Image: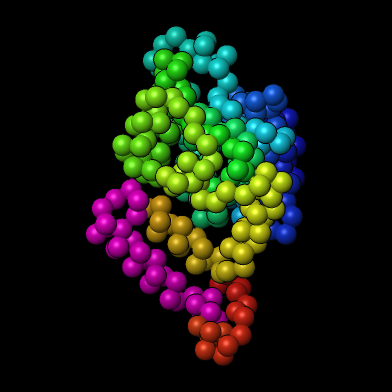
Amino acid sequence: MPDFKFINFSSENKIAIISINNPPANALSSKVMEELEESVDTVLKDKEIKAAIIKGTGDVIFVAGADIKEIADITDAKTGQDLTAKGQAVLNKIENSEKPFIAAINGLALGGGCELAMACHIRIASDMTKIGQPEINLGIIPGFGGSQRLPRLVGPGKAAEIILTGDIITAKEAHRIGLVDKIVPPEDVLKQAKGLAKRIISKGKLAIAAALKAINQGLKTSLEEGLNIESEMFGKICGTEDKKEGVAAFLEKRQPKFKDM
């Protein structure tokens, strides 16, 4: 396993656990983002890993934002654009992954923390979680994808309200508007995330990858083109051994034994 300073990385039962470890706020500094990218690359390249969970180290903070001291040092447009481009590239790797990433939101998820969670495919939050994009309070805007992913999750009006007011919302409200997918007690966040990951990876790897590709690419285009992408992915899956096994298992009333072929 890779050796990091700001990321705790482990793998068990084909599920990687990526824990942001930059106390006290688990801020996404440049160094943290470099290690996060390396940890994501490890997940993508390791054939034994089939899913990943991202969480914050500690009991009350997922990620409380970017490194404000680094942002304070930015005084020109190019440096600001370079910073956001690097951050966006890391989160894009998560979103576009053919392996599912689950955000286990164990507390505050603000600014970059909210953006990191939104880049994951599924979000499970503690009922004590508070989440938002408060960058407007610093005279800036989200830079790691918040202005783009948030409207796609909650709608443009609600996203504009959250971003323009800088309001921090509760887990209950985040669930109501579709920002998080499930709320559980704080002590159950990681357990629930692991359970969900285990259920997902029991399915065929090829079908999982095709489904994620259809979802992610379809969201970036028109409904008509999205349907074409879905059809293409469905067609490719039809020629696999896993499809034959899945259908045969259903007809024979048994559990399928997928071989990722």
> Which percent across, then down, holds residue 146?
43, 33
Q: Is residue 165 visible?
A: yes
Quarter holding the C terminus? bottom right
Q: Position of residue 232 (x, y in %)?
A: 35, 66
Prevailing SS of the magenta stretch = helix
Q: Residue at x 59, y 37 (%)?
A: 129
* Residue 230 part of the magenta segment: yes
Q: Is residue 38 magenta?
A: no
Residue under the point 52% across and 11% down: 72
Q: Which residues are magenta?
A: 218-246
Look at the picture and state if 245 lies above or below 170: below
- Classify residue 238 by image quadrant: bottom left
Measuring 62% from the left and 77% from the top, which residue is drawn there?
A: 257
Of residues 93 and 62, the one nearer the viewer is 62
Could you say where residue 36 lies in the image, as x and y percent from the top left?
61, 36
Q: Nearer the viewer, residue 134 or 168?
A: 168
Q: How is the image coloured?
A: rainbow
Left/right placement of residue 5 relative to residue 86 reads right
Q: In the rendered image of this protein, does residue 7 appear above or below residue 245? A: above
Quarter of the image for the N terminus: give it: top right
